[in-house]
Image (cartoon, rainbow, N blue to C red):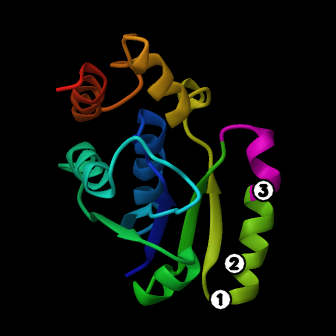
Amino acid sequence: MRTVIYPGTFDPITNGHLDVIIRALKLFDKVIVAVAENPDKQPLFTVQERLDMIQAAVDGLENVTVDHFSGLVVDFAKTKGACAIIRGLRAISDFEIEFQMALMNRHMVREVTTVFLMPHDRYTHLNSSIIREIASLDGDVSDFVPPAVVEYLNQKYSGS
């Protein structure tokens, strides 16, 4: 079974992320969406909230599991028996840092390949930071994120 890891902070997951997951399912037998616990970032949502949002977003998609990790993604990929790591590229500006990370990952664990996927062009402008900003200003993000995420954002910003 060809397993791929799709790592990210997913704070929150967007329709662009979901599009990459669906595209990855066409190339791999199993997709593990892995929430990164990054001590350098201060996410809006807890790891558990992000896991729950992703699980709700991928509900109904076969061969997708949700997990979390800390440390190096290549080590996580190796422990899961993954042959690849998926990275989404929205713009050329994403490429340089992703390319450097891919080369470093390949140096550390040769048997894990990095595959770059572009989301559908209708999602290239999306990122979690923009979603959080719009939601914090009481804007409608329902076209950009799965329904469960809208609920989480509303709860977070309404104070309830």
The dot on residue 109 is: 1
Mark 3 and mark 2: Cα distance apart in space: 12 Å
Q: Are marks 1 and 3 in contact (CB under 8 Å)?
A: no
Name the kind of residue labelled 2 in the image.
Asn
Residue labelled with disc 3: 97
Q: Nearer the viewer, residue 39 or 98?
A: 39
Pointer 3 or 2: first along the chain? 3
Is residue 96 magenta-colored? Answer: yes
In-front residue for pair 60/158 = 158
The answer to whether residue 93 is left or right of residue 44 is right
Which residue has dot 2 on it?
105
Residue 131, above or below 43:
above
Q: Is residue 129 magenta?
A: no
Whether residue 30 appears in this view of the structure is: no
Give x and y (percent) for residue 110.
Answer: 68, 89
Residue at 59% over, 58% down: 40
Q: Give the dominant element type of the magenta stretch: helix, strand or loop.
A: helix
* Amino acid residing under circle 3: Ile
Image quadrant in which the C terminus is located: top left
Closer to us: 131 or 117: 131
**Structural crowding at the residue carrying mark 3, measured as other residues with C-alpha within 10 Å and reported as few (<14), some (14–19) or many (≥20):** few
- x%, y% of residue 7? 49, 62
Q: Residue sitting at 64 percent across and 69 percent down?
A: 114
Residue for point 48% across, 53% down: 9
Q: For the residues labelled 2 and 1, say whether their Cβ atoms are less than 8 Å apart.
A: yes
Where's the N terminus, which quadrant?
bottom left
- Dot 1: element: loop
Most foreground residue, 26 or 15 = 15
Per the rendered image, the range of residues in magenta is 90-97
Mark 1 nearby-residue class (10 Å; few <14, some 14–19, many ≥20):
few
